[in-house]
Image: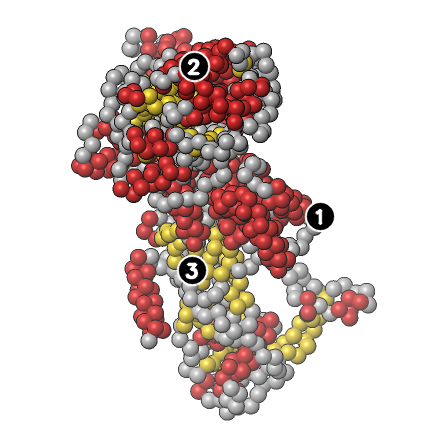
Amino acid sequence: MQPIDKLIRNQTASLLMAIVFCILSISLFEPLLFWVLLIAVCATAMRVVMYIGWYQPVPSSRTINLLGLLCCVCLVWFSFSIGLLLTMVNLLILAGALKLMLLNAPRDLFHLFCTALFVIGIGFTFHQSFVMTLFYGLLTLALLVALARYFTPSQTVSWHAKRVLTMGIQALPIAILLFLIVPKLPPLWKMPVGKSTETGLTDTVSPGDIASLTQSSELVFRATFEGPVPEPHERYWRAITLEQFDGKQWTVSPLRKQARQQYRLLNYEFSPSLSGSWWQYEVIAQPTNKHWLYGIDIAVPADHASDQMIWRGADYQILSESPLSTRRAYRLRSYPNADMSQTLESLDQRLNLQKPESPAVNPLTQEWARDIATRFSDPEDKIKAVLEYFITQGFTYTLTPPAMPDQPVDDFLFTHQQGFCSHYASAMAYTLRLMDIPARMVAGYHGGEVLQPGVLSVYQYDAHAWVEAWIGEQGWVRFDPTAVIAPQRIQFGIQQAVEEEAFLANNQLARLKQLPFLADLQMLYSLMDYQWSRWVLGFDAQRQQNLLALLLGKVTGKSITYLVLAIFGVIGLLLALYFIPHWRKQQMEPVVLWYQKAVTAVAGYTGIQRKNLGPQAYQDKVFAHLPPASSAQFRSLSEQYIRLQYQPAQPDRKTAAFVSDCKAFIRQIRRQPAA
Amino acid sequence: MLARLSARFNQYHERWLRKRIPASNRYTLHLKNVFIFPTRFGFGYLLTCISLFLLGTNYQNNLMLLLCQFLLAVFLLHLFISYRNFTATTLSLKPIAPVTAGEHALLTVQLEDKHPQQPFYGGLHMQLRGTSLSLLNRRADQEKQLKLLLPTRVRGIFNLPRITFSSTYPLGLFRCWTHLDFEQQLIVYPAPVPSSLRLDSADTTQGDTSGPNLGIDEFDSLRHFRPGDPMNRVAWKQAAKGGDLATKTFTQSRQESGWLSLAMYQDEPLEKALGLLSYQVNRLIGQQQTFGLRLGDQIVEPGSGEQHKLQCLGQLAQYRTTDQPYAAD
């Protein structure tokens, strides 16, 4: 092959590719290690310098290999702290950046292109909002432009951009058809997931944890109700049941985990009998990389796809089969009045009477519990006494309680007497256990902001903790000490409950929300985001099935075959529309078109066909046959036409005038009675 | 064994091609003479799509799936875009000027757009089938011409093999190609070997026993310079002395009986003999002399001028050779 063109490094294509890659890396700012990002930016800078021509030689591949080796060693070192998924992302960016430095042959360009496409795919793990999708879509097109520019250097970048955009618009309907029709498979194998996000519940709750969550206005999930929406005080979204207490922290009981594992092995799913009224709703949960899902009270999957995805635990917790690495939709039905005594009582009792045995842990609380236990015998009276204590002793509800490091329950109950929901729940559950009432802490969310009728948005600051106690026949009964101390928290939400305090003190965004204009904008964005997550991100196997049922009536093998054929047909039609040449008529210039219309009108009136006469000759021929007014008009038209056709560079307005004259003439001649 | 099989296959392929794309000196590309298949990069692209699909399924991420499906749609569209672009062109080969052995022959392929509103874009790669001679012109759409130099080593008349043209416009996902037979011959004259003139005056019937004929160009007189006279005939000495430009005229002692004959070089190897004759043909034509050529049984009647020269050289090129396929090395 003979070199005919510029070297790759001096081509606009490689510069474009480098810039797209750089923007892509920057968009992954959060998952990337700082030094990896730095290498990516440096590689781009190198490309720019090479393109401009300040520095020409490409670094030798040995240098880059050494650098790559060094980077890999570093990455292995960091991988222990960032987890497998993030290591992979970093590795991918690193490989791309090193390739970018070496970029010297067409093949390198292709490798880089494929890597960048893959990185865009990975980007969707971290960003799924509508805006980011649009952004990544544009980056994809930019990549295509860069590649097209490499193959056709004789055209400008803007020419390529126009072509690629047209092609992208043509491809979109096909892509959407495929998206709708290609079966949504369940995960084929387990993939590494990232570490959980900083905010959000964890499966270990110490009393201060939930208070810190109230500083975050991040969305947790949205619920769309079909039919009635629960009243504000009924919106207890369970997430985790915490049954193990060590005197300071509540955690998920290891015994419970074991039991769950055994049940899973036996495929023995907890299925309570259900009764009473229900709420049906769809939850679209934000990614947490955790297994637990959110549901009110006793929640069971409402359809097959959700059933596939959800495992129901015997602690009324619902768990996803795979961690929530992306936004996920599932449909539930909640039975608030159903009996909660259907679990294995012996196991529940054993787990929920567990308490730190040592007398040195919270001794005052132990003594106090013994005292109550001697005074009352009925468990309900004991519970009432505990709640009574909270009310009469002037406990206050605050987001910023003093630190209680040593004996948290003692300090809370007898020294500071102020705290957040988790303090109350922790203290109460512990006290009940001391009085031999099985009790546990439930962490989750309470409340929800109405986005539009029937749709609730739940944010991190709605995080809440409450208590469940086993009372005789009734089984598990919910007690919420916070409702006693700060009823407005339960009725109106956290914002009302702690208004005097600096709610979301650190969150600038929330403060901006106070401005009415921005509040509207935010609302609009939330609505859009909701629809986006509902219809695009939440388009799962169930929705696909619903859609098919809507299209086909009844989903059978035969009808599916027809549908697939139909889809192929539609795609074929689209392709024909795009590619069969001259499917649209050869566009005539307006001047010619209108002159011919005028001639047709004249021929219709006079009966003299133009055939191959020139405009002047034809005009002379028909002049006498037209009525006087029309003949003058037609002469003027013919003259204009000759001028427009045979004199160069006529202004556009003359064309417009000619066209309107033609229209007037045709109207007039049609009104004349035939000669 | 393998070599034989592949040779057999090539034979079949060649025969099939002859039927499918018959020889012509001008081709309009269309469905029947164009092949299309994904390139290596195209398969790499598909592999990326598959990875994205697996990733999207495993993470249950609809946007990844949408991206994957968008890329697949792009792939599908490019099948048609590539094909439409490639078939928008008409290819023809300009006649190849004969060369002497050792020189490079220039192959020029002309591109024309079938429809002005839908021009051909992108680069074009061309390769002589069965040789390593190839060329990628990345600006073929602008230059409308592809030029390739063909090295020649030996004299002869060569059949040009089929030329493979391929285009990967616009994204390199697909390669469209065609094998065209332009029915052209490449004429390679023997390389001239400088020597003194040996013109045989004898009649054909007298055989080739007569001696060499020297001194054909004796100086005769001077006449006024006329535009168009060869520069080497100008009497520069006179001009330098300040006189008008004058042209020397020569007379040829025996113009009517000049014959170049291979038989005179019986002692020389054939190729060298032909080289000597080639040189002399050129020289005689330069001197505007009339001469004939005898190559064994083949006889070129005496004549002069460019046409005569081509005829003689052509005879020299094909003497005792058959048409053979062109091989670059």
Q: Who is closer to the viewer here, A609 or A16? A: A16
Q: Which residue is mark 1?
A: A54
Expressed as whole percent of the image width and height from the top left, the position of residue B316 reads: 48, 76
Left or right of residue B108: residue B240: right
- Residue at point 28% right, 24% down? A341
Q: Quadrant of the N terminus of chain B?
A: bottom left
- Residue at point 40% right, 72% down? B323
Expressed as whole percent of the image width and height from the top left, the position of residue B113 reads: 44, 44
Q: Please, what secondary structure does the residue beneath circle 1 have?
A: loop
Q: CA distance from mark 2 to mark 3?
A: 98 Å
Q: CA distance from mark 1 to mark 3?
A: 42 Å
Q: Say whether mark 3 and mark 1 are on the same chain.
A: no
Q: Please, what secondary structure does the residue beneath circle 2 have?
A: helix
Q: Which residue is mark 2?
A: A385
Q: Who is closer to the viewer here, A555 or A365? A: A365
Q: Say whether mark 2 and mark 1 are on the same chain.
A: yes
Earlier-in-chain disc, 1 versus 2: 1
Look at label 3 and name its amino acid.
Answer: Ile
Look at label 2 and name its amino acid.
Answer: Ala
Left or right of residue B70: residue A183: left
Expressed as whole percent of the image width and height from the top left, the position of residue B170 reads: 46, 45
Q: Which residue is mark 3?
A: B163
- Residue at point 38% right, 30% down? A352
Q: Please, what secondary structure does the residue beneath circle 3 have?
A: strand
Disc 1 versus disc 2: nearer the observer: 2
Disc 1 versus disc 3: nearer the observer: 1
Disc 2 versus disc 3: nearer the observer: 2
Q: Say whether mark 3 and mark 2 are on the same chain.
A: no
Residue extending farthest to the bottom is B209
